[in-house]
């Protein structure tokens, strides 16, 4: 299922289901923002699981170039979980994170999931703003979950969005 989107800056994106063939590209993108980025092998292992799905965003008109954003999620026992999401720095603030999350939400609604959970670094204000705008609410906290060069150890906020 290919889903086209048009951003506010007139960049057009298409979202395609993530496949094992995307593992190296999303691993490279993951390195931009994570202190302990996942390897292409870790992504491939996850994508081989029946319960894991995701979407890759590619700029329309740029052929088979690597994704400029992606989201990876899991659905088990009626509950979804965002495993990770990333958008290339050069494509941020154009609504691509929203579009990726919306694709997951639509997929989970079609599967009749009851809720979607995620964890986010409490210092990631852009992500927190996005998730709150999407209807997520804080339901817990994990102290010292993340480590960053700028902030040292930081907590993870556990967030939930009901889907029914």
Image (cartoon, helix red, strand yellow):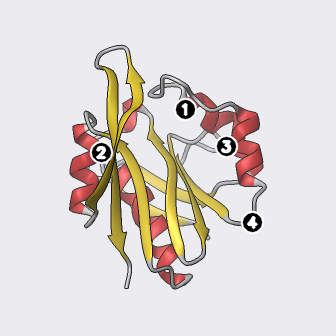
Q: Which residue is mark 4?
A: 50
The structure residue drawn at horizontal position 51% and vertical position 67%, both measured from the top left corner, is 80
Query: Alpha-carbon neighbours of circle 3 within 10 Å: few (<14), some, or many (≥20)?
Result: few
First reached walking from the N terminus: tag 2 or tag 1: 1
Closer to the N terminus: mark 1 or mark 4? 1
Q: x and y percent of residue 107 in the render?
A: 53, 74
Numbered mark located on residue 127 in the image: 2
As measured in the structure, the alpha-carbon distance from the residue carrying label 4 to the one carrying label 3 is: 25 Å
Q: Quadrant of the N terminus?
A: bottom right
Foreground mark, 1 or 4, reads 4
Question: Toward which corner of the image does residue 48 lie, by quadrant?
Answer: bottom right
Pointer 1 local density, CA inside 10 Å: few below 14, some 14–19, many at least 20: many
Which numbered disc covers residue 29? 1
Residue most extreme to the front: 143
Tell whether label 3 touches label 1 (CB within 8 Å): no
- The answer to whether 79 appears left or right of 46 in the picture is left
Identify which residue, 55 or 111, lies in the foreground.
111
Q: Position of residue 141 (x, y in %)?
A: 32, 47
Distance, label 2 to label 3, CA atoms, is 28 Å
């Amino acid at each position: 299922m290919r889903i086209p989107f048009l951003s506010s800056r007139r960049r057009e994106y298409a979202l395609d289901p993530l496949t094992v063939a995307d593992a190296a590209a999303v691993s490279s993108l993951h390195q931009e923002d994570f202190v302990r980025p996942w390897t292409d092998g870790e992504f491939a292992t996850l994508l081989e699981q029946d319960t894991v799905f995701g979407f890759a965003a590619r700029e329309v008109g740029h052929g088979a170039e690597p994704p400029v954003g992606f989201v990876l999620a899991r659905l088990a026992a009626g509950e979804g979980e965002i495993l990770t999401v990333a958008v290339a720095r050069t494509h941020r603030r154009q609504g691509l994170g929203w579009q990726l999350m919306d694709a997951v939400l639509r997929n989970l609604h079609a599967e009749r999931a009851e809720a979607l959970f995620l964890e986010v670094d409490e210092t990631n204000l852009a992500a927190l703003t996005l998730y709150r705008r999407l209807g997520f609410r804080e339901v817990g906290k994990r102290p010292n979950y993340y480590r960053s060069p700028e902030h040292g150890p930081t907590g993870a906020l556990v967030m939930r969005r009901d889907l029914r």
